[in-house]
Amino acid sequence: MYQDFNDENKNENYGYNGPTYNGPSYKGPVYSTPANDGKGQAIISMVLGLTALLLFFSFINVPLALAAIIMGIISLAKYKTKHLPYALTGIVTAVLSLIIMAYSWSMVFSNTDRVMQFYEDTQQLPGFDIDADYMGDQEYQDL
């Protein structure tokens, strides 16, 4: 009923001795890769620049801004004016975030003496004592 094949009797068609198809085989559809037009780099530059602008007070904006500037310059150098608004937005917002960060941190560090003076002045105010229990003082019970 079943034919037993051993290694000598095996052929390529597994026992089928009819006509075979020797034409070209089906290779599937041919997909072409999309052209790299640089829009992705320009949009990444814009997103990184806007994110750096939003996070200007933290130091995370420095690597974000540098990455935005680099991606924007690469996009402008490779693809010229095709996606100019995205790349320029990324570069301008990144530079702006670095300028705002430098200005804000310089204001914070230049006013440390004033902050310390304000803290010392509030400590010396009459009746101001951090350790006092104000609920037990006589002058507040009358209120």
Image (cartoon, rainbow, N blue to C red):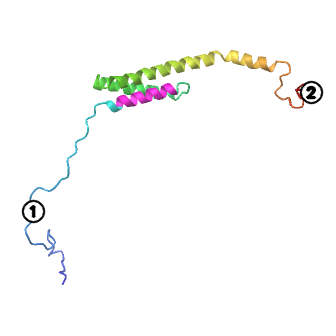
For disc 2, the neighbor class at 10 Å (few under 14, some 14 to 19, many from 20) is: few
Residue 64: percent from left, percent from top: 46, 29
- 90 sits to left or right of 100: left
For numbered disc 1, what is the local secondary structure? Answer: loop
The answer to which of 117 and 141 lies nearer the viewer is 141
Whole-angstrom CA distance, mark 2 to mark 1, is 108 Å
Residue 69: percent from left, percent from top: 41, 24
Give above or below for 79 relative to 103: below
- 76 sits to left or right of 115: left
The answer to which of 23 and 127 lies nearer the viewer is 127
Asked if residue 92 lies in the magenta stretch, the reply is no
Q: Which residue is mark 2?
A: 138
Q: Where are the magenta residues, as a range?
A: 41-54
Pick the quarter of the image with the C terminus. top right
Q: Residue 21, which numbered label?
A: 1
- Residue 135 falls in image quadrant: top right
The residue that appears at 49% across and 22% down in the rendered structure is: 97
Farthest front residue in view = 143
Residue 21: percent from left, percent from top: 9, 62
